[in-house]
Amino acid sequence: MKIKNIILSAIIALGLTSFSGVANAACGKLVIAEQNWASAELMANVDKMILEKGYGCEVELVPGATMPTFTSMNDKGTPDMNPEQWANAVYTLMLKAVDEGRMIQGNKAPITGLGEGWWITPGTIKNHPEIKGMTALEILEHPEWFPSKEDPSKGAFVGCPAGWGCQLANANLFKAFDMEKKGWVLIDPGSAAGLDGTISKAADSGDSWLGYYWNPTSMVGKYGLTPVDFGVPFAGRDNWDNCIMKPAGECADPKPTAWTKSEVNSLITSGFAKKGGNDAVTYVEKRTYPGDVMNGMLVYMADNQAKGSDAAIEFLKKHEALWSTWVTPAAAKKIKAGL
């Protein structure tokens, strides 16, 4: 009996030692999406620096955009993380992926003070004082206030670049509000820079502008954009998820609706959890940018034409009191030493 007990104890000890080694294994290689707008660039690069310097991960950043990145994560399990997944664009599919264990909502609110929808420039209000307080329903009766460059007889509504989830939403809202019949054209700005360019040009010249944007962003703060009330209530998740967010032609009868409540997640795959380990997952769970901090960083990026990598260094140097609460004390020490 004593020999058997000794052997059993040795086996248990060996098993526990082996398990401990797995649980505390070094962080492996992680692939993170660096999407093509400023806040997403910042977050991806901050994640890279913190995970590498603080936890010894090997991080590769790859280009991304809302829909393509989610599709790749869902179908192929890569990249391992999307720091700024606008959930409304993929809500039903995301919940299915989470339920089936392919993905994890690593952080359900990585940025505070969010909002997206339709906005106007200060010049719009100056040119047409009566617009102040108008709803979208009322504004859409006046396409002549927003003449299109290509056809001044039509009103220009600026939507989203191809590949963004909001492109689908704006195209279906354009149809739901009968905007074509009312004399409007839907403008594709081509890129994030193109969208920002339409706003800055209109704001600097005092021209009227109506289109899609979101907050927190440097553009909203810098140019004083004003959100527009849609004038109709939110028409429900079924209309939004199964129609408004569908590609052209997949919903024949979209209902007019206010924009759904903005939800952003830091979305990770099951592979991230396995390769990154508990420390990496816990970091993602704790990482939340206050809206004013994010807006300040975005203004810095815009004013200095800073890339995400440069902005990440600026953030880590300027906001140590914030990010140090996201990581372990040992990781914080390593990160600070690596700056």
Image (cartoon, grey):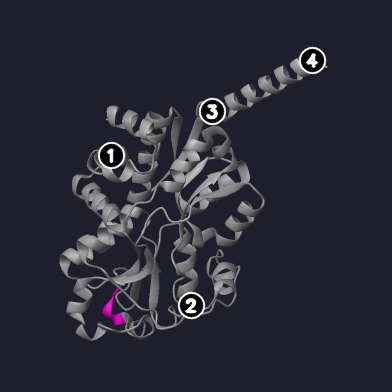
The residue shown at (58%, 56%) is 94
Q: Name the residue under label 1.
A: 316
Q: Mark 4 points at which residue?
A: 2
Label 2 vs label 3, nearer the camera: 3
Residue at the image point whose x is 55% and y is 39% from the top:
273
Q: Is residue 8 above or below residue 137?
A: above
Q: Give the range drawn in magenta.
A: 144-148
Q: Which of marks 1 and 2 is in front?
A: 1
Using the numbered discs, state the Cα–Cα distance from disc 4 to disc 2 in whole angstroms. 72 Å
Name the residue carrying label 3.
24
Which of the two discs, 4 and 1, labels the residue nearer the N terminus? 4
Q: Which of 135 and 233 is in front in this view?
A: 233
Does dot 2 land on a helix, a strand or a loop?
loop
Residue drawn at x 65%, y 54% is 99
Q: What amino acid is found at the position of numbered circle 2 in the picture?
A: Phe
Question: On residue 234, which mark appears?
Answer: 2
Q: Nearer the viewer, mark 4 or mark 2?
A: 4
Label 3 packing within 10 angstroms: few (<14), some (14-19), many (20+): few
Amino acid type assigned to the residue bearing label 1 in the image: Leu
Whole-angstrom CA distance, mark 1 to mark 3, is 26 Å
Circles 4 and 3 in contact, beta carbons < 8 Å: no
Picture layout, residue 156 above or below residue 56: below
Q: Which of marks 4 and 3 is nearer the N terminus?
A: 4
Numbered-mark total? 4
Question: How far apart are the alpha carbons under marks 4 and 1?
Answer: 58 Å
Report whether residue 37 is seen: no
The type of residue carrying mark 4 is Lys
User: What's the distance in space between the residues labelled 1 and 2, CA to CA?
Assistant: 39 Å
